[in-house]
Each structure stands twice: as C-alpha cells, then as structure tokens.
C-alpha cells in the first residue's frame, strides 16, 4: 500500500509539473498585456551588442554601432512603433537535427531559423505557418524585409517550390553563402583547390579536412565523382543547365551513392580529419593545407590568419557549389493562430532586415545577409565598400561588379567596386562571389525518410571498420591464441588437482 | 523499529533518481530497440546487429582499442601504484594527489593540449590515428587505474609478505606469489573502470581525429539520422556485453579473494 501511495505521489508530482508548464506556455499574453515571442536561432548568430568604442562602422550614410543586443533593440523598437510591449524569449540550437528533435519532442517556438533543407522538411510536414499578406506589402515602410531583400535571394525563394508551394510563402532569408575550399596558396595551387576531387589529391596527403556531416561530404563527393560530366561542354551548354545541375547534385540513386561511398572511402585515407568545428583553427595554425568550408566561416578564418600575416585563399570548385541559406520560419504550434503574435514575429524579421541591423549582423557574424537594402538605401553596399574598397594609391586593383546582388543587373555601373586584386580570391570572393559562381550553384534538397536511411547507411559504410576487412590470418591467430589460452588454463587446473 | 523506518527514508532521494533517470530511460531504450519505425514489435534490429559486418567490425575495433588502452594503463599504473604504496614516504597522499590532480582539469582542455603536443612530436596527427587514440584515452583514464591499485596494494597485510620471506621466497617470488594475486581485486576494478569507458568514449577519437567510428560514435550517427531503433539496439547489446563482463570479472574477483585467504 505504502509503495502504491509513493508511486501515486510521484506520478502526481511529475504530471502536476508538466501540467503547469503546458498551461504557462499556452498563455502568449502575460497579464500585463505583453506579447511573449519565443525565438530559437543558431548560437552566436545575431549581434549581441556591447561593441568597443573603436568598432564604430563609419559609413557615408552614418555611423553604425551595436550598443545593446538586437533582441533588446527590437523590444524597444516594437514598443515605439506599435505601442505594444513584446518580450522575446531567445534560445539557441546547435544543429538543424537538434532543432528538429526539440520540435518533435514538443518544444514550442514561434520563430526559428534553420537551414534550407530543414525549412523544406518543416514545410513539407506542415509545421510551418505561412506569412500574412501584409508581410509582402511593399508600400508599408516597416516591411523592411520585402523592400530590402536582395533580388537574387528573392528570385531563389520565388522559383523554388516544395509540395506546390513557394518557399517565400513560409520562409524569409537571413544569411546565405556558398561552399568551397579554403586553402594555403603556398601548399596548393588555386587550380588544384578548384575541384571537388581535391580530397583525394596526394600532394596534400593527410593535410585536408572535410565536414563531419553527411550532407556536406556527400555534396563534395557527388561533385568529385561526376566531375568529368559536370565540366563537359555538352553539359554546360545545355539549355536547362541550372535545372539539370540541381538534379545531378541531388542525385541519390543507388549507383551514385555507391560511387560516393567509394570516393569517400578513398578520401578517408587521404584526409586529416572529418571535422565539425576544428577545421578553421587547424587551417589558421597551418596544420592543414585545405579545408572544406562554408563561405562565412572561410571569411572568418582568412581574417584571423591575416592577423598573423598568414595569407589564405578561398576557391569555389568548378563543378558546382552548394548554395545554402538560413531563414526565418514561423511555426504553427507556437503561433497557434494568434494574430498579435504573428505580427510580432513578422516584425522581428523586418527589424532584423533594416539595413543598419543587417550590417550589424554581418559585422558580428561574418556571413552575408540576404538584405541588400533595396533601391533607395545603400547602407549595405556602403558597408561592403567600407570593408573592401582599395586605397587610391594601391596599384594592383581590379573592378569588381556587385550589381547582381544589389539591383539584379550584373552590369549595373552604380555597383562596381575597385578592390585590390587579391580580394578576388579572398574575402570578397567568398562573401559575394562573381556571377559565374552563382550560375554553377545548386541548392541541396532535403532527404525523405527512405533516402535518409539509405544515405546514413552509406555514411556508416564509410566511417566504420568493416569486419570483412580483417584478413583470415587474424581470425586464425585469434583462434590459436584462444585455444592456447584455454589449454593452459585447463592444464594448470589439472596440475593443481594432482 | 523507529530506527529502521528512518533509514528507509534515507533511500528515497536515490530511489526517485533511480526511477527517473535509470529505469525510465532503460525502458525507453528497450521500447525503441524492439520496435520499427511504424511502432510495431520487431527483432530485426537485433538480427541486424549481428549480421551487419560494419557493426561487428566496429565492435571488434572498439574491443581492440579498449584492450590496448587497458593493458597500457595497467603497465603504467601498476609499477607506480606499487612503488607508492610500498614506499616509506610520509607524504604519500601528496604524491597520489599529483596523479589525481589532472582529473580536475576539464578533459577537453587537456585533450586540446595533448593534441598540440602530439602534433609537435609526430608532425601530423593524422598519420597515427589508432596510436593517438590509445595515448589520449590512456591520458584520460590512467587515474582510474592507479587509484584502485594503490588502495589494494597499500592495504596488503605486511605480515603475509614477511611470512613468505621467512619461508624462503625471494623478492620476485614474493611479488609473483603473494603481492600480485592479492592485488587482483584492484586490477579487476581498475580494468572495469578503464575498459568499459574506452569502448564507448567517442570524444577522444573525435578530438584526436580518428576517422574510424567506435561504438559510441556509431550510436550517435544512427541517432542523428533519426534512427532511434537501430541506435537503441546497439546501445542495448553494448549494455548486455558490459553486464556480462562485470559478472565474469566479479565472480573471478571473489574466487581470487577466497583463494588468497585460504
């Protein structure tokens, strides 16, 4: 009886607390009329303010300085603009998979910022809340996102669909980039670094790293095994080049997966490591000669290395590059049809899309914002100029067209920047690659459940020690040793008896 | 009567802990191990474990790794524990503290330092992944081997050793016939504390860039692909192996202790 009482007590305790918790979270408006907005973003992926005095970005259009975090600034701005108090509960996740697990475990968020494929997955599973029509109204000044998003990103979000619905209906971009190889020009030529076959290059034996996640590794491996075909004139001159490239890079047929597996197994014996976060540090300290990297992290690594007068460069392989982005997406289980909350969530995106806030984020995070500022606002372009424009005295300079990202017109004369020649291989190249790089970029789609299992199997085949690789003599030796051991034990036992 | 009641209540915090954090997760593990993606009962995961040459290979690789780490730990720890325990130092506790102290520094920090040292020695970490992993794990687990050995050897009854000498045994014979058998409990518990973590601790191979999975990383890779079922089954089989191992060593330990007393 006592035991029963104890367990009953325990159960009430456990469920009691759960109940209180779920009750509390359902209440989006606290008694004081404050809206509670739950936001979940990547770690260190928003300006947290607290800049040093000398960090002021002095642009032609005015100074930009991060005093408070953008989250606090948003709360103030929302109250000033709409006269409504909002409290942001800001939390972070480490990987897309972690975020997905959190959501399937029942965590409720209003606004999250996963990567492209996770956005597609959430959309296809019906977890995403569509934006309201007002969000797309260009006549409203506060709609900074739709007025300021780069024409290039806007096009990507308009043209791609999942389950018959445009991405733009559910997702707003935040940061974007490409993937490529950051390398030490003293140890590897630019030509060698400009192919996905670099991972089996024996010249840098055990001096190259690849990402320790199956999606990135697979993209590189597909590029490597299909290299000849992707680089052939026949393929490149096709009418439907972009679509075909996307199909090829998203090919998960059994034959391709087998090729990918073989390539990665070869690469494994040539790699320094599979890395999750150590690649940048190993690159900066010179332990490795080349490193698979996302463009934003590559910028960071190049800047860090430069402080020690160590010059690194960034190359995007000729075959193709993975165009990726992280974007904001509202969730049904958090918003629950609450229009006030939805407005706050959309305003949060708009606030982050204000050109000066986009610059603050770009400065803090190092990635390229999807915001170009629209037609009238040149803050973002000024920031790039502030960052990269060559000194008037500098000799080795080139004209670098950026119009594609700002007005949509590659030739636009308003957006041609004079930069030092090496920037065409370094930070500027990584942050705003030339148009031919964008032309050969492909978005990597999400894997459905079956494909996911298949791909994971491939990955395990690459990473595991296969029992079939153990030679027969080893098993024989093992048998002899075991037999010998047993024999000795039995003999001693018999001896002891006697 | 009253006294026993009070004692019983002392166990309540642990009982709650046990139910919430040991038994409940185990049940969840069992559930996932024996179901498939649709939630139906299946033994496919179990069959899969023993028919997949990757899983078996990883198991063998982990076993080999753990075996080498344990042997190296034992070879380093026994002499030092013996010397410390037998020495006439007054400040023995200070010396033993010196060995335990590294444990107080966060181990990822220690591994990062080790990484730099190994790079300085070898030139490139990636040339010797297996050896590096062994060194890293030995570095990590050595105190767990030294402490039990030191404890057993220092508690050895000196009169037994004197008796052996009186009966004409040489120093080597004393060691082999008396000290070593009597320190067997220490060896067994030290082995258990090193061998089992060495099989599953995937942070060390990860940080020292061993690209080959061990059991822990294999489970992790299933989980990150949302395959809770196969991952749970591997964890469960590993658990059974550990239980078996503990039972085997446990009974041997008692046998040895009994033998020594006789």
Image (tube, coloured by chain):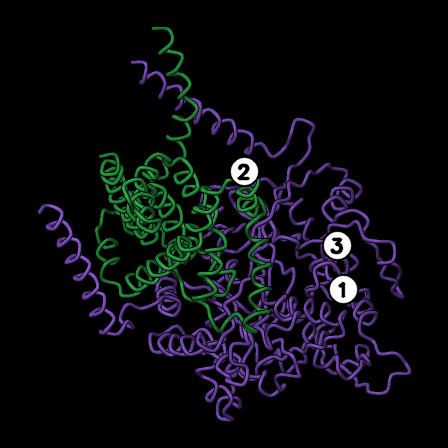
Chain colours: A purple, B green
Query: Which of A498 and B208 lies nearest the eye of the viewer?
Result: A498
Q: How many marks?
A: 3
Query: What secondary structure is found at the residue carrying circle 2?
Result: helix
Tag 3–tag 2 contact (CB < 8 Å) = no
In this picture, is A15 found above or below A211? above
Circle 1 residue:
A373
Query: Disc 2 vs disc 1: Cβ atoms closer than 8 Å?
Result: no
Q: Earlier in the sequence, mark 3 or mark 1?
A: 3
Q: Mark 2 or mark 1, which is nearer to you? A: 2
Residue extending farthest bottom: A233
Q: Which residue is mark 2?
A: B93
Q: Position of residue A488 (x, y in %)?
A: 17, 57
Name the one closer to the observer, A423 or A185.
Answer: A185
Q: Which residue is mark 3?
A: A140
At horizontal 53% and vertical 55% (from top left) the residue drawn is A95
Q: Which mark is residue A335?
A: none
């Amino acid at each position: 009886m006592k035991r029963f009482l104890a367990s009953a007590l325990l159960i009430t305790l456990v469920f009691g607390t759960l109940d209180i918790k779920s009750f509390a979270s359902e209440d989006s408006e606290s008694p004081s009329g404050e809206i509670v907005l739950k936001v979940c973003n990547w770690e260190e992926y928003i300006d947290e303010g607290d800049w040093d005095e000398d960090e002021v970005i002095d642009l032609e259009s005015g100074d930009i300085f991060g005093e408070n975090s953008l989250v606090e600034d948003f709360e103030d701005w929302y109250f000033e603009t709409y006269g409504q108090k909002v409290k942001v509960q800001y939390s972070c996740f480490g990987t897309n998979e972690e975020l997905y697990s959190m959501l399937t475990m029942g965590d409720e968020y209003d606004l999250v910022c996963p990567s492209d494929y996770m956005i597609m997955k959430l959309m296809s599973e019906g977890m995403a809340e569509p934006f309201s029509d007002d969000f797309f109204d260009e006549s409203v000044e506060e709609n900074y996102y739709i007025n300021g998003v780069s024409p290039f990103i806007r096009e990507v979000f308009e043209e791609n669909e999942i389950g018959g619905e445009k991405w733009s209906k559910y997702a707003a971009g935040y940061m974007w980039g490409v993937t490529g190889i950051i390398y030490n020009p003293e140890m590897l030529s630019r030509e060698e670094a400009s192919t996905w076959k670099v991972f089996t290059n024996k010249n840098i034996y055990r001096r190259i790293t690849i990402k320790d996640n199956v999606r990135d590794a697979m993209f590189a491996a597909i590029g490597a095994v299909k290299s000849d075909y992707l680089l052939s004139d026949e393929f490149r001159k096709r009418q439907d080049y972009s679509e075909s490239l996307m199909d090829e890079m998203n090919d998960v047929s059994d034959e391709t997966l087998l090729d990918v597996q073989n390539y990665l197994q070869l690469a494994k014996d040539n790699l320094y490591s599979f890395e999750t976060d150590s690649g940048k540090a190993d690159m900066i300290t010179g332990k490795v000669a080349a490193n698979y990297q996302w463009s934003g992290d590559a910028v960071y690594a190049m800047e860090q290395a430069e402080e020690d007068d160590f010059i690194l460069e960034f190359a995007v392989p000729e075959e193709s590059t993975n165009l990726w982005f992280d974007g904001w997406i509202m969730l049904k289980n958090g918003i629950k049809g609450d229009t006030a909350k939805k407005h706050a969530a959309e305003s949060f995106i708009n606030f982050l899309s204000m050109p000066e806030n986009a610059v603050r984020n770009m400065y803090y995070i190092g990635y390229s914002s999807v915001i170009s500022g629209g037609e009238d606002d040149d803050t973002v372009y000024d920031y790039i100029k502030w960052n990269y424009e060559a000194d008037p005295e500098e000799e080795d300079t080139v004209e670098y067209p950026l119009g594609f990202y700002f007005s949509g017109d590659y030739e636009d004369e308003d957006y041609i920047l004079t930069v030092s020649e090496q920037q065409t291989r370094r930070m500027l190249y990584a942050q705003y690659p030339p148009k031919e790089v964008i032309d050969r970029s492909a978005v990597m789609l999400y894997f459905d459940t079956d494909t996911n299992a298949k791909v994971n199997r491939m990955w395990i085949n690459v990473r595991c020690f296969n029992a079939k690789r153990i030679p027969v003599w080893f098993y024989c030796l093992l048998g002899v040793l075991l037999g010998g051991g047993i024999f000795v034990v039995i003999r001693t036992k018999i001896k002891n008896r006697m | 009567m009253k006294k026993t009641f009070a004692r019983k209540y002392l166990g309540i915090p642990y009982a709650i802990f046990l139910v919430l954090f040991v038994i409940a997760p185990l049940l969840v593990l069992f559930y996932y191990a024996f179901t498939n993606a649709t939630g139906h009962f299946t033994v496919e995961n179990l069959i899969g474990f023993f028919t997949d040459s990757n899983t078996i290979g990883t198991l063998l690789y982990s076993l080999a790794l753990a075996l080498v780490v344990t042997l190296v730990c034992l070879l380093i720890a026994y002499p030092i524990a013996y010397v410390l325990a037998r020495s006439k130092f007054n400040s023995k506790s200070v010396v033993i503290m010196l060995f335990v102290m590294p444990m107080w520094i966060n181990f990822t920090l220690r591994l990062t330092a080790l990484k730099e040292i190994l790079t300085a020695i070898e030139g490139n970490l990636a040339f010797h992944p297996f050896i590096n992993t062994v060194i890293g794990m030995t570095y990590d687990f050595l105190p767990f081997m030294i402490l039990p050995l030191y404890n057993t050897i220092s508690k050895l009854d000196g009169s037994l050793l004197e008796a052996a000498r009186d009966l004409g045994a040489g120093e080597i014979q004393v060691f082999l016939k008396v000290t070593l058998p009597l320190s067997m409990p220490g060896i067994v518990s030290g082995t258990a504390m090193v061998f089992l973590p060495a099989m599953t601790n995937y942070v060390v191979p990860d940080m020292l860039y061993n690209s080959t999975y061990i059991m822990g990383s294999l489970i992790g890779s299933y989980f990150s692909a949302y395959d809770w079922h196969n991952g749970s089954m591997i964890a469960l089989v590993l658990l059974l192996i550990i239980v078996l191992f503990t039972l085997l060593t446990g009974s041997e330990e008692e046998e040895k202790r009994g033998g020594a007393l006789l």
